[in-house]
Amino acid sequence: MQLFKNRRCVPLTHGFGRIVAIAVGLLAALNSGHSDAAEAEPDFIVRHATVFDGERRLTDTDVLVQDGRIAAIGRELKAPAGVSVVDGRGKTLMPGLIDAHTHTWGSAGRDALRFGVTTELDMFTDPRGLPAARAQRQARAAAGSADLWSAGVLATVPGGHGTEYGIKIPTLSTPAEAADFVAARKAEGSDYLKIVIEDGSAFGHATPTLDAATIAALATAAKSSGMMSVAHVATQNDAATAFASGVNGLAHVFIDRKLDASADAAFIASARDHFVVPTLSVNAALSGPAESRALQDDPRLKPWLSNGQLGTLASVFPPPWSKTVFLDRALNNTAVLHRAGIALLAGTDAGNPGTAHGVSLHGELALLVRAGLTPLEALRAATSLPSSVFKLSDRGRIATGLRADLLLVEGDPSVDIQATRAIVAIWKNGYPVDRSLRVDERPETAVAAAAGSSLIADFETDVTSVRMGQPLSITTDMMAGGKSSATQAWSAGGANGSKGALKVQGLIDGGLPYAWAGTLWMAGSAPMQAVDYGTRHELVFKVRGEERTGMAMVFSGPSAQSRPAMQSFKIGHDWTEVRLPLAGFAGVDLAKLRAVALTVGLPAGAFSFEIDDLELQ
């Protein structure tokens, strides 16, 4: 398993570390008791607003909403008695935003909705949640999260991109497997097919990937089954392969080189009749933290950011993957494709380091304008255009009979694209959206001081005695719906002749695409409380057990549900001292250290290991 979330299109829903983060975060969750969606009667009229209807800008316009749908549009509309009136003067009413590239998990849909993103197009997630997603988007009830369409499981080769997250997923290697693979995706509820064309060359390493014949077979099978196909690419050559193979569009703009309108005329011609989701947000994150910091610091956005969103916005790609040139190339290539008339859809790749669901789409709109789109064109890229491309017939525009997914903002984003950030109100299916943060979502305001000791526990007498933080406790994937199990107990005879050690043993279940079991130490006096250990340099412990690879995970940052930074270690039959530099945990924030977990994952089966002398030096 790779030690960090790499490059682009990172399926954090499936990522082993992300699932653990969500599950461990549940230990700190408190129930605020309020509903995510306001249960008001969904009948109202917005009067005298500027209206962006998904295509055009209309001035001094009224929009009447009844029974969750747009009932009428015009000037000086007559409304039924008793319908509530919203003053739209000085404001712009627009369709709910559509993010055309995300990866969903946990609170992603709620986070998206809080920033006016009423629909997400997911590019790799756990297919078990797709029936519920389909039911929500077909209903017109009050909803506390964005509607979801998804590719489910992506198409990749054994060992290819998408398999590096410690998850067991179906793969394929030959054209003969394509039809069955696509049929299986459609049967589990996927709305379109995601095809990975990624040889790693843009990032300086080799990765196995699908060959052209298999890509073409997948695209053909998808078309035969009534599904669109979308390709993950990082290089121009891979984009050319996708177009030649019959794939409908690209989930990313390529970043290995700058496109030239004259020299690359043949390639640009081949891109016609296709669409591209540039995902400038994740390319900005690959190039540095500047764009995500701007979102975090924007006073129009900051009050509504959950601790989870702050965590992913603050996290960074590790140096092997980040290059400052990526954003410049992505902006250039987006501009060239735009001038050539290629359809561009707004998508963020949210869930990756430096991005967050909902809020990052506002950054994406600004980046599209920076790439040469007009504000109106950028707004279309996040409303009517993805609706048209993905055949979302009931949304993406303000038109009579369509779903009342609406966003009201101060100012005019057709003139100043950043006006989308000044949100006045959001409606989902005509119901007003409650933007307030639950208690467990609110950012922390205080960080505890570190203990003076470097030793966490030496297990000389029992498993509960610790020098700092809380006693170690079992953590397993049962918290995320899995079936792995574990126990821990004191074991006589520790490392270097000491009196005792902590023994952890159990069973990793193979029926889950992600799995883990192990022991967890929380640094604070309260569950997942942040503690300042900024002066520490190494995680040190001794380990022995049945031979396999273990995973050390460090939870840190502004959110109790931030993804953990990870490093692997070897477990052998003899006691071995493991020294893991804390700087090697990519993106770790030691000033807000929350927990450390020592775990094992797949392969399935029984496991047993002992640890001794656990330290933060």
Image (spheres, grey):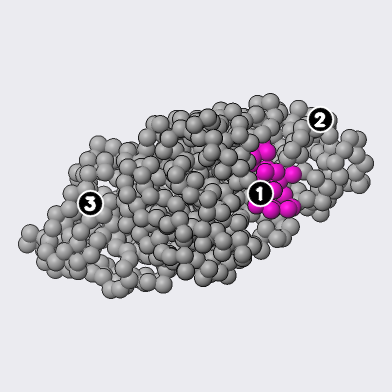
Residue ID at (7%, 59%): 496
Of 591 and 368, the residue lying toward us: 368
Determine which residue is flagged by label 3.
Answer: 456
Between discs 3 and 2, the one toward the N terminus: 2
Badge 2 crowding class, 10 Å Cα cut-off, few under 14, some 14 to 19, many 20 or more, is some
Whole-percent x, y for residue 17 in the image: 38, 54
- The spot of residue 177 in percent (x, y) is 47, 68
Identified by mark 2, the residue type is: Thr
Question: Which residue is disc 2 drawn over?
Answer: 59
Residue 417 seen in the figure: yes
Give coordinates of residue 537: x percent, y percent: 22, 40
Q: Residues within 10 Å of mark 3 (few under 14, many from 20)?
A: many
Between circles 2 and 1, the one closer to the viewer is 1
- Measured in 3D between alpha carbons, the distance from the residue under mark 3 to the one under mark 2, in whole angstroms, is 65 Å
Q: Give the residues drawn in magenta, as a range.
A: 379-397
Disc 3 to disc 1, C-alpha distance: 55 Å
